Image (cartoon, helix red, strand yellow):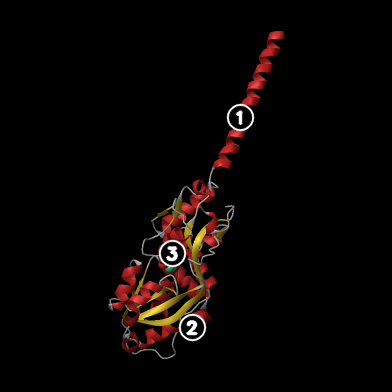
Amino acid sequence: MRKNWSVALILVLALSLLVTGCTQNEKSQGEEQSVVERFNGKIIGIEPGAGVMLAAENAIETYGLTEYTLVEGSSATMAAALGDAIRNEEWIAVTGWTPHWMFARWDLKYLEDPEGVFGEAEEIHTLTRVGLKEDMPEVYAFLDNFQWPLEKMQEVMVWNSEEGADPYQSALRFIEENEELVNSWIPEEAAAEKGKVRIIYVEWDSEIASSHVVQAVLQEKMGYNVELMAVDAGPMYQGLAAGDADATVASWLPATHGHYLKQFQDKLVDLGPSVEGAAIGLVVPSYVTIDSIADMQ
Ligand code: PBE
C-alpha cells in the first residue's frame, strides 16, 4: 500500500514537472523570438519588375531591414503564401496593393510607412501608343471614357479569385450587371471600320480584371477584335512605346510606375486615371502585433 502511494506521488511530481517544463519552454521561446524571426526573415514579393518590388527594396534600405530577404515570385505565389500563413496563424509580410481580393477574403492591414517609401494614393492610368487617336478614334474615345470605382474593380477581382472563375466570364458578368456604367464608356459615334485592338498588360490580379473588362466591352458591345498581350512591366512600357501594342489600362502613377513613364514619356499618350484611391505597401494579417515597417527590425 505504502509503496503504491509513493509511486503515485513520484508519478504526479514527474508529470507536473513535465507540464511546467513544457509551458515554460514554450513561453520563453515566444519571448525570445524576435520580430525578424517571427517573419522568418522574409518579405514575400511578386514579379521582379513590379513597382511594389522596387519600393520594397527601398523600404529594406530606408528602414535598415538588413536581416530580411525580399522573396521574388508572382502575384499567385504571394497570395498562396499569405493564405498558408493565415491558416497556420503565422506571421507573414507581403508586398500588397489595393484594390485586391485579398482584403475581401482575409483580415489584413497595411504596415504604416512613416518614411513614405510606398508613396501616397495612387491612380491607375490608361496609356495609348502615339497615333492611336488618329488610327482608331472610337477606341481612343472609349479608352478615354473608361473609368470605374475601385470597389467595382475589386468586386471583379473577387469573382476571378473564386475557383474556376474565368476572367472573361467575370467581365461578361460585370457588363451585364453594370449596364449604365458600361454604356457611359461607349462613344456615341461608331467607326465604320472595326479592326484589331492590342491591349498590353501584366498578369497582376487587378490588371487581369480591368484588361478583360476592356476586352469584353470592345468585343461584345463595340464590335472590335481584341488581343490581350501579357508581359512583364518593363516590356509593357517598351512594347507600347514601340507601337507593338495599342493601349494599356495597367499604369500605376505617380509613384509605382513613375520611373517607367519617365523613361518612355515622349512615346506614350496618358489618358488619365481609370481608378483612383489605389495604393501599394507591405501587408500583414491583422493579428500581427506590430503596426509599422519601422518596427520590423
Ligand atoms: N502592382 C499591381 C503593380 C501595379 C499593379 C501593385 C503589383 C506594381 O507594383 O507594379
Label 3 CB-ligand 1 distance < 8 A: yes
Q: Real-space Cα distance between discs 1 and 3?
A: 45 Å
Q: Real-space Cα distance between discs 3 and 2?
A: 37 Å
Q: Is residue 51 above or below residue 294?
A: below
Q: Is residue 196 left or right of residue 204?
A: left
Q: Is residue 166 above or below residue 246?
A: above
Nearer the observer: mark 1 or 2; the answer is: 1
Q: Is residue 225 above or below residue 19?
A: below
- Across and down, in percent, residue 49 comes to 36, 64
- Across and down, in percent, residue 50 comes to 39, 65
Marker disc for residue 21: 1
Q: Quadrant of residue 220?
A: bottom left
- The reply to whether residue 198 is in sight is no
Residue under label 3, please give it: 55
Marker disc for residue 183: 2
Label 2: which secondary element: helix
